[in-house]
Amino acid sequence: MIKIAPSILAADPINLERDVHRAEEAGCDWLHIDVMDAHFVPNLAYSPEVVRRLKAVCRTPLDVHLMLDHPEQMLDTFLEAGADVLTVHAEIDANVPEILKRIRHSGALAGVALKPGTPFEAIRDYLEKADLILAMTVEPGFGGQKLDGRVPEKIAQIQKSGYNGLIEADGGIYENNLPMLAEKGLTVAVMGTAIFGATDMRETIERLHRI
């Protein structure tokens, strides 16, 4: 069964606690939290304090995606705040395998993300160090974008590589294209508008789980 990870970027920021509880009650598997520094991507979102406060009121694992130039400087802060899954980007100017090792050592799942234009080969040498690979299906930074047609084959490439961890995708995922991504090997779907904009969130998540 595909894990459904609603992205809180699509929730109502004024009623964030209400919306995440709605998602939990509807049966979501994880809550996805995008952290952006306005440098690595052209947007700004979510401090460690948001993660800490959500951890205090949520029972669902927190899937934290660090879109930062220097995530290594913030790893301990986000781990202490309560990240259950912590993902950094392959494109950063840092020792990604060492960062993944630090995350795993903390007890959290270690993830590595690829922008749509970054080839799978960029992470081939350290697949064994990652518990999750996040294939961005849009250019990271903003919600509501259309899924990049290059990425489904990248997901298939990851699945066929012998990698045994989780394969996640984020951006432009809806009920009409999730079956195709699942066929390629997707195991975790990050969905924003498709979940928080649903008329009946529980019914929507139940249908998605059946895919």
Image (cartoon, helix red, strand yellow):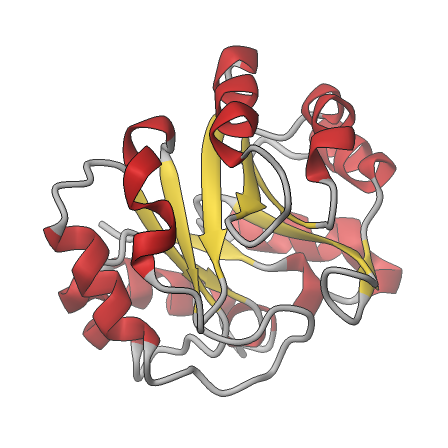
Q: 205 above or below 55? A: below
Image location (x, y in percent) of residue 37: 82, 55
Residue depicted at x 81% and y 34%? 53
For image coordinates 49% across by 20% down, the residue present is 101
Q: Is residue 179 above or below residue 1?
A: below
- Left or right: 187 in relation to 130: left
Find residue 167 and report its horizontal and vertical position in percent: 31, 50
The answer to which image quadrant residue 84 occupies is top right
User: Can residue 3 be seen here?
Assistant: no
- Coordinates of residue 150 in the picture (x, y in percent): 32, 80
37 vs 190, nearest the viewer: 37
Residue 99 placement (x, y as % from top left): 56, 28
* Whether residue 143 is visible: yes
Viewed as shown, does residue 1 lie left or right of 20? left
Residue beneath the point at 58% across and 50% down: 32
Count of marks placed on residues: 0
Q: Quadrant of the C terminus?
A: bottom left
User: 179 or 94: nearer the eye?
Assistant: 94
User: Is residue 82 shown above or below 7?
Assistant: above
User: In this orientation, which residue lies closer to the viewer: 100 or 58?
Assistant: 100
Q: Residue at x 78, y 25 (%)?
A: 77
Q: Nearer the viewer, residue 31 or 154?
A: 154
Q: Is residue 68 left or right of residue 63?
A: right
**Is residue 191 rendered to the left or right of residue 127?**
right
